[in-house]
Image: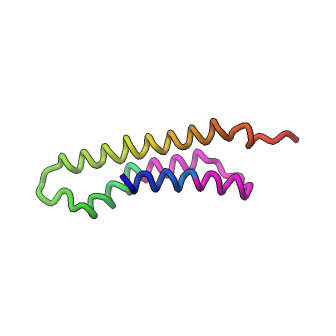
Amino acid sequence: MGCIIGVALAQGLGYFWLDKKEIRFPKWIILLILIVAQIFVFPQILFSALSYGKNGCGMPIFGLLFYCVVVGGGLNCIVHSTYYLKFRSSSKKVL
């Protein structure tokens, strides 16, 4: 759980940092990278750290993958949507 919350915090801090430095980088690309990482990277890290799959049963692996995708990806989407809705008016500057 701490890994997923840490990724969501890093995502929010990354968004704030990009806006503070006024770097024009699409935030949806960051969201896409993090969702792909939630599907392919983070479950593999947790599999090796928790030693799942050694006994031949796939249920713990399926549960951990489902947890990473649903909770992690969902939390990333919530952070992205919240940031977008809260700060979209301040990001559109009048010339």
* Residue at image coords 71%, 52%: 24
Residue stretch rendered in magenta on the structure:
13-37
Magenta segment main secondary structure: helix
Question: Horizontal and vertical percent for residue 20?
Answer: 71, 55
Q: Does 75 sit left or right of 70 as displayed? A: right
Q: Is residue 54 above or below residue 30?
A: below
Give the residue at the far right of this rendering. 95
The stretch drawn in magenta includes residue 62? no
Q: Quarter of the image holding residue 90? A: top right
Q: Does 14 sit left or right of 57 as displayed? A: right
* Residue at image coords 35%, 47%: 68
Q: Quarter of the image holding residue 63? A: top left
Q: Does 90 sit left or right of 10 as displayed? A: right
Q: Does 48 sit left or right of 88 as displayed? A: left
- Quadrant containing the C terminus in the rendered view: top right
Question: Horizontal and vertical percent for residue 87?
Answer: 68, 41
* Residue at image coords 47%, 54%: 7
Question: Horizontal and vertical percent for residue 91?
Answer: 73, 43
Question: Horizontal and vertical percent for residue 81?
Answer: 56, 38
The stretch drawn in magenta includes residue 21? yes
Q: Is residue 47 above or below residue 36?
A: below
